[in-house]
Image (cartoon, rainbow, N blue to C red):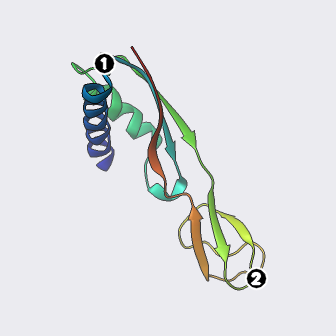
Amino acid sequence: MHEMSICEGIIQVLEEQAASQHYQRVKTVWLEIGPLAMVENDALRFCFDAVTRNSLAEGARLEIIELPGLAWCLECARSVTITKRYDACSECGSYQLQVTQGEELRIKELEVE
């Protein structure tokens, strides 16, 4: 379950930012996650609750912003929505797609005290 290591990385970032920006507690974390990031949101929420115990984010709310997967079709020159890395173009059926969005996994915003 790589969601646990993702949450540990999030806590590390929160602690580093707390030291540099002088906040004591994290109340809410907003994450942007694309479908190609290969993250199971329910597992991430479970791990976040476990990892934040006894940290500056204990009891923090985790808000997940789900981004769409997008790709540029090299064959028909259109931007198309995808849900998996190896989807075909919904317009022409080509597999010559270049991913332009959907691999994101980043902290978008924090609510802190």
Secondary element under disc 2, as helix, strand or loop, is loop
- Quarter of the rendering occupied by the C terminus: top left
| N-term mark: 1 or 2 | 1
Tag 2 residue:
76
| Most foreground residue, 39 or 105 | 105
Query: Which residue is outermost to the left?
Result: 54
The spot of residue 13 in percent (x, y) is 30, 37
Give the residue drawn at x 60%, y 48%. Answer: 67
Asked whether, in this view, residue 112 is left or right of residue 53, the answer is right
Secondary element under disc 1, as helix, strand or loop, is loop
| Residue 80 location, quadrant | bottom right
Badge count:
2
Give the residue drawn at x 58%, y 75%. Answer: 98
Going by the numbered disc 2, the residue's amino acid type is Cys
Give the residue drawn at x 55%, y 64%. Answer: 84
Tag 1 residue:
58
Residue 103, label in figure: none
Asked whether, in this view, residue 53 is left or right of residue 34, the answer is left
Asked whether, in this view, residue 62 is left or right of residue 73, the answer is left
Give the residue drawn at x 55%, y 57%. Answer: 102
Please determine whether, in this image, residue 6 is positioned above or below residue 29. Answer: below
The spot of residue 11 in percent (x, y) is 28, 33
The spot of residue 51 in percent (x, y) is 26, 30
Crowding at label 2, few (<14), some or many (≥20) Cα neighbours within 10 Å? some
| Residue 19 location, quadrant | top left
Asked whether, in this view, residue 69 is left or right of residue 11, the answer is right
Going by the numbered disc 1, the residue's amino acid type is Glu
Distance CA(mark 1)–CA(mark 2): 49 Å
| Most foreground residue, 97 or 19 | 19
The spot of residue 76 in percent (x, y) is 76, 82
Crowding at label 1, few (<14), some or many (≥20) Cα neighbours within 10 Å? some
